[in-house]
Structures are given as structure tokens and as C-alpha cells.
Image (cartoon, helix red, strand yellow):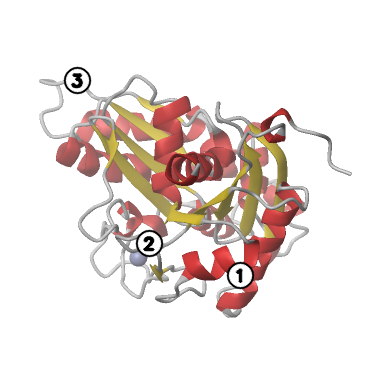
Amino acid sequence: VPPTSPATDGDRPLVVGVDVGGTKVLAGLVGEDGSVHHLTRGTTPGRMASPEAVEETVAACVRRAAGDRVPDAVGVAAAGFVDATGARVMFAPHLPWRGEDVRARLAERVGAPVLLENDATCAAHAEASYGAGRDAGSMLLVTLGTGIGGSLVLDGRTWRGAQGMAGEFGHMQVVPDGAPCECGRRGCWEQYCSGNALVRDARSRLGVEPTVLTELCEGDPDRLTGPMVTAAAADGDLVARRTFTRIGEWLGVGLSNLVAAFDPALVVIGGGVSEAGDRLLDPARDVLAGSLVGAGHRDVPPVVRAALGPEAGLVGAATLARATYC
Ligand SMILES: [Zn+2]
């Protein structure tokens, strides 16, 4: 029996936030102050699964987070392109949704109104409301998960773009004819700077240099994960540390383009890869300071870790859902 949460007492609206990522689904009850209760997780069915399989996983997580009560509203943060009306996921490189009417189908499954929004846009809304960007006014959020998500807050407003597709920074081309990307194009930034890129880079060193990563993955490169690389780097493993340096430098390359374009007051880095902290951010700061247009004649914005961690997406989604439906 789930404990009674203050967020669910009396006539306070029950609002659930869900983050649907490429590898996991995270859900929780979100209070008016952005606090998260009853955090629960599921495994995202693979890219080859049916859209319905993903929707059932989402609905199951919502039921667990709500303690089998019917929520008043559900906010869904999706790792993909959400259309301007917030009804459909047009395309999601790591999920099986292709033009699916996700909002209506999920609303039917959970029995409550659903707000659907891009995951990075949700995370930026949460960071700007409760987290690292609270006083920034204009901030750039880059989330390094399976791929790269992003969002821009301009003068306090999340910028969605004409079609709701702004902020897909991960698919900026940084290497002409570079590594193939899940989006069907080549040389996208997320192929060089993301959780996938981190693991791929570390894998390429196995058997080349001595590293504790070989033991951690029991000699099977396919079993190597991002958290293993993070843990090995924290323990002083040089191969893992150099991997973070390279990923961090690629982070700086993309940031220097984005800061040149948008001139934000603050750059916030979220997602699982950012848990490495300064090991990742210092090389990014160095590259940004050295390569930003006008360097030496302007202030370079601070690059900081997100404050809300992996829950930012679901908190932002729930906050938007509450503002819309409650
Ligand atoms: Zn791409």
C-alpha cells in the first residue's frame, strides 16, 4: 500500500509526470512545489516494438505513481518531436512513435487529460521554474542521455518553434559525412557527445589499453554501460577519464555554436552523462572559452550542471499539465 502523500491529500489535484526516454520510463507524483513522490520506473520497449507497447508501459508507470487512483492530469515528456498542438509525436529517433496521436491514446489509457511535450522542453521548464536557471532569464539547456536533447528559454519563455520542433541540437551536423545517426543523416552532434557516444568511445579502447572497464563489462564490450564509464572515471581509470575529456570537448564544440547563435545568460547541462560533473564540463568550458566568436571581448556564459537531475523532465511535464488542466 503506497504511503499517503501530502501531494494527494484532500482536494489538491493529483498530477503525475512521466518521462519517456530511449531506454527507460520514469514517472512520479509531482507536488505544486516541484517535489516528486512515488517515483517509479519501467523499461522502454525497443525501437522495433509497437507504439502500443510503449503506451502500455507509460500507462503502467502512471498507475504505479498514482497508487492506482485516477490522476487529475498527466504530463508526458517524450524524447521526440511533438507537434505544435501537443497532440502527436511526429518522429522519435529512439522510440517507435511516427506521427502517432499519443496524447489522445494515452489519455484513454490513463483516464485523465494528458499534456504531451518534448522531454528537453519539459526539463528546461523545470530548471527555469525550480532549478539551475531560476534567475537566468535566458538559458540554454542541453541534456546528454541516450542522444542529445535541448531547449532554449528566452526571456523566461520556453521557445517551441513554429512547428514545436525547436531545440533538436543533437542533430546539428558537426562532422560532414561523419558517423551515421539514428535520424538517418550523418555527422550529427549526438554521435560524438551523448551517452551512446560515451559508451562507443570507451568500447573502442577495450583491448587497446589496460582499463578497469574490461573487468566491469566482464570482457564483453556489449555489456559496457555509461554508468560503468562514469564509475571507472571516478575511481581514477585513465581510459575512462580520457573518454570523458573527448566527450566534453565535443560538448564545447556544439556549445560554442549555440552560444554564438543565442547568447544565453547561462548554459545548463543535464542528462545521465552530466553526472560526471566537472570531468565532463571542464573540457567543454575550455573549448567554449577558446572558440566562441568574440572570445576575449565578451563574457562567456557559465556552464553548470542541471539542478533537478533525471527527474527534471517529468517535473516539467507535470508542472505544464497542472497549469493547463488543474
Ligand atoms: Zn541525427
Horizontal and vertical percent position of residue 288: 27, 33
Amino acid, disc 2: Val
| Mark positioned earlier in the residue sequence (3 or 1) | 1
The relative height of residue 220 versus residue 134 in the rendered view (above or below) is: below
Horizontal and vertical percent position of residue 124: 40, 39
- The residue tagged 2 is 82
Q: CA distance from mark 2 to mark 1?
A: 16 Å
261 lies left or right of 51: left
Horizontal and vertical percent position of residue 215: 76, 52
- The residue tagged 1 is 54
309 lies left or right of 299: right
Foreground: 40 or 66? 66
**Residue 271 — which label?**
none
Residue located farthest toward the front when viewing the structure as drawn: 11
Between tags 2 and 3, which lies in front? 2
Amino acid, disc 3: Asp
The relative height of residue 224 versus residue 29 in the rendered view (above or below) is: below
Q: Secondary structure at mark 1?
A: helix
Residue plotted at (64% across, 49% down): 71
Foreground: 84 or 165? 84
Q: CA distance from mark 3 to mark 1?
A: 44 Å
Between tags 3 and 1, which lies in front? 1
- The residue tagged 3 is 299
